[in-house]
Image (cartoon, helix red, strand yellow):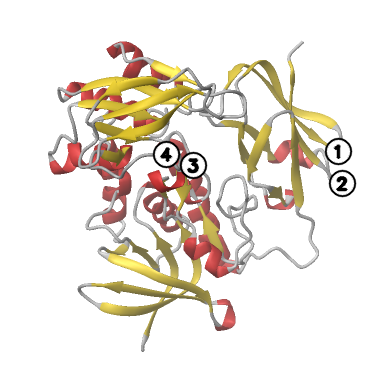
Amino acid sequence: MDRTAYNLIIIGGGPAGLAAAVSAYDAGERSILILERDTRLGGILNQCIHNGFGLHTFQEELTGPEYAQRYIDKVVERGIEYRLDTMVMSLEMGENKLKEIMAVSEQEGLRLYSAKAVVLAMGCRERSRGALNIPGFRPAGVFSAGTAQRLVNIEGYLPGRRVVILGSGDIGLIMARRMTLEGAKVLVCAELMPYSGGLKRNIVQCLDDYHIPLKLSHTVVRIEGKERVEGVVIAEVGPDRKPIPGTEEHYDCDTLLLSVGLLPENELTITLGAEMSRVTNGPVVNESLETSVPGVFAAGNVLHVHDLVDYVSEEAGKAGESAALYIADSAELEEGAPRIPIEFEGGVRYTVPSAVAPDRVKKWLKIRFRVGDVMQNRKVALYLNGELAVAKKRRVMAPGEMEELVLTEKILDAHPDLKRIELKVEEDA
């Protein structure tokens, strides 16, 4: 089977893939192909018809489709090639460090591609009911929040009239408002953890504004009904996340929406053999957003789940630029050159990147991270060789909102013999 060769292939045509392609083109690369399994570019943004996108990137408030169209226009204006309805089946390392991709589509059948560099931008998927072990039958009326969003916003169907939502991720919060606006009654939003997994603004705008109760430290313990959901029972959970007997509450409803977490789509990444993070379920990357496989970069929700698409675009822009530079001069890290892991403590769950080669940082580097619990009155500090280099005060930090620190080239130049990088969350005196 003949192989079609490109310098850069981007797997995924959502916000990450589009931004990576535009950035790589602007960095000088012209041989680019985007492979997208859906019938259109834009990814999940096409069904996110609410506003709140683009405030950081475009300094104006846009809907999801409007935000996606801005980047689609950039791709079209630059003449970047893309294939729709194309599913990537495998990604492997070939000879001479080329990456070999097998993809299938209805129009072209099975096709083989080769590339000098690849950007992984496959996004993420929702965790299903099967991962939750909720007792009860398997009646109609149980949907993931994203599926319900597509049914309402794209297909024009209303999944139900009386709704209970399990999980307070951003999609679930947004769908609480959307279902209410479409005439449904959202009875309650139950969250297993003692804090919400969504942005504070979404709690206010989607629950508080519509008088929808949010019950923290609660979960669904039973689904009633055989053919169709007839009701659910929720109960309070203790510190061990197990239901507390005697706290059960029954809700008559016909629909249960699940907003219980997102999983990066990393089957291809794992098969390729890239080092993976147990915390993010995404690949481990360096300051160039390059995985442990040379020439393979990752960005967006396939790397770690984001709360703002603006951050996805910024991160993917970095990945696309890094891929273009890799192609231009085979800018692999020299054997034996120092790559320093970022150590963290004080409640930090992970960092992206996880390691830094100081001589590769040009101008600045954003270190993004999440904390594992709600924290108040903290100082986030970055230490280089034990010396405080960057710090900022945070009145409130929560797991649902990503944090960041900026490490500049100037700061790194002041530490020429850098051997240790530490990120700490400390009490703010």
Identify the element where label 4 is drawn.
loop
- Please tell me whether mark 1 or mark 4 is closer to you in this view: 4
**Circle nearer the viewer, 4 or 2:** 4
Q: Position of residue 307 (x, y in %)?
A: 45, 34
Q: Amino acid at mark 3?
A: Val
**Mark 2 touching mark 1, by CB under 8 A?**
yes
Mark 3 Cα within 10 Å, few/some/many (few <14, many 20+)?
many
Q: Earlier in the sequence, mark 2 or mark 1?
A: 1
Lateral position of residue 106 relative to residue 7, left or right = left
Work out how far the residue at label 1 is from the one at label 3, CA to CA, in angstroms: 30 Å
**Badge 4 vs badge 2, beta-carbon distance below 8 Å:** no
In terms of sequence position, does the residue under pointer 4 or pointer 2 come before the other? 4
Q: Please state, as top left, top right, bottom left or bottom right, where the N terminus lies in the image.
A: bottom left
Helix, strand or loop at label 3? It is loop
Number of the front mark, 3 or 2: 3
Mark 3, residue position: 305
Residue furthest to the bottom: 1
Q: Residue at x 86, y 33 (%)?
A: 386
Q: CA distance from mark 3 to mark 2?
A: 34 Å
Q: Position of residue 62 (x, y in %)?
A: 28, 30
Comparing 364 with 343, the one in front is 343
The span from disc 1 to disc 4 (Cα, nearest Å) is 49 Å
The residue beneath circle 4 is: 134
* Residue pointed to by mark 2: 417
In the shown orientation, is residue 329 left or right of residue 111? right
Q: Is residue 81 above or below residue 127?
A: below
Amino acid beneath label 4: Ile
- Name which quarter of the figure residue 335 lies in: bottom right
The disc at residue 385 is 1
Local packing at callout 1 (Cα closer than 10 Å; few below 14, some 14-19, many 20+) is: some
Q: Quadrant of the C terminus?
A: top right
